[in-house]
Image (spheres, coloured by chain):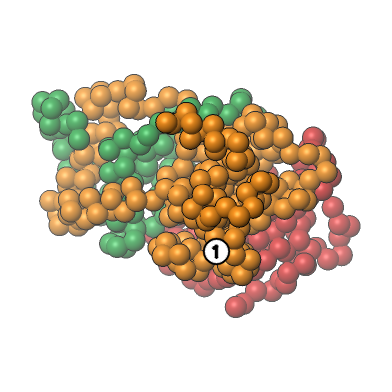
Amino acid sequence: MTDHAHLRHGVKDNHYKRLAIAVRELLIEKGVVTEDEIATFMARMDARSPELGARMVARAWVDPEYKKRMLADGSAAAEELGIAVDGTLLVVVENTEDVHNLFVCTLCSCYPRTILGLPPDWYKGREYRSRVINEPRAVLREFGTDIADGIELRVHDSTADMRYLILPQRPAGTEGWSEDRLAKLVTRDSMIGVSLPLRPDQLDQLEHAAE
Amino acid sequence: MRSHHDMGGEPAGPVNMAEHDYDPWEKRIDAMFSLLVQEKRLMRVDELRRGIESLEPNAYETLTYYERWIASIGKILVEKGVLDQAEVDARIAEIEQRPDAELEA
Amino acid sequence: MSGRFSVGEKVRVQDWDPPNEPRKPHLRTPYYIRGKIGEIERICGDFRNPEALAYGEDGLPKQTLYRVRFDQTHVWPNYAGPPQDKVEIEIYEHWLEPAAGDSSP
């Protein structure tokens, strides 16, 4: 999907926007839902972002016992940090010297929304969903990620009831860093597995650019 | 027969990295659906998916993500008798007559 | 937890292609993996069957869900990557059959 309704259409010429308004109004008039309830769910969703997943990753980098618990039960590990997962069954898989993981949903666009927020457009698009399963290394190169031939690449197709989070490797040169500082290295894409976390020098550049 | 939504391994072009921030109307559809599933227990995720998969291949390819969602949600709610197709159609026709300012929610 | 397969066991995915009549099936087993042989990576638990949930039915009895690991070179004959690469997929028990006697991929 390369274009978006919000660019193409206003409400007037978009049947689906009108349908959305019609469905919502009718559900409210019938007493099925209320405006407040919808607002509550929107706020709940807005509170979800990759920062939640990054906190989990940073904790796992500094606390080996937490990492063990996280790999055994990702949902419990999220809740341990006060992150509500709303029943999501989270599987955390770990990148190592020998294995690199990434996830996709080839059938729709299942995504660990409770800990990463809403997915990026490309995650839901035909190109990623089609190709990352049978030519993952080529797709990773499009993201600027080169996985050496000696490394085992594992693609997780999120087809059913589990949701995935990739635990990336802790970058070199971060010895002694605080958990908060480490979390800044953990990008959304590194938790999907299409990129590696930032290196310390990349974080420096970003922070200088922001000043 | 492979369904058009089941696309693992199909040929496709390079990944388009452009991203957009979700608009309020998209978030509102998402929130309404989550509410219907998690709290109201009126729909299930698998029903949403089935409704999306039932779109014609051309519609599946050309609609945006949340356009597909609302198409499915509307269909499933009518199927379940929560909404009536005639009242949905009538409301859409009425919305077409409203001034633009009221619609940009 | 139920489940007829154990971790490490070789399984074959059913090579089913259900018809679209009388209703288009909602299937969570991707087309590309049907008929392929893999190994149980873990047992995820028991879940209502999405094929029935998608049509508003209760999805009972629950089905055991497994994560199954496949060699990419087995799944895709033209796979361009190295031989150790894997794909891992969640598959419900009714889509699996034992493959212990088969030559491993």
Q: Is residue A83 left or right of residue A175?
A: left
Q: Is residue A74 visible?
A: yes
User: Residue A88, percent across and down?
Assistant: 47, 61
Q: Residue furthest right?
A: C103
Image quarter hosting the N terminus of chain B: top right
Element class at badge 1: helix
Q: Is residue A126 left or right of residue B38?
A: right
Q: Residue at (62%, 77%) from the top-left corner?
A: C2
Q: Residue at (51%, 33%) from the top-left corner?
A: A206
Q: Chain of mark 1?
A: A
Residue B63, image quadrant: top left
Identify the residue position indicated by label 1 in the image: A74
Chain A on-screen colour: orange
Q: Residue at (31%, 53%) from the top-left corner?
A: A44
Chain B on-screen colour: green
Q: Is residue B56 left or right of residue A95?
A: left
Chain C on-screen colour: red
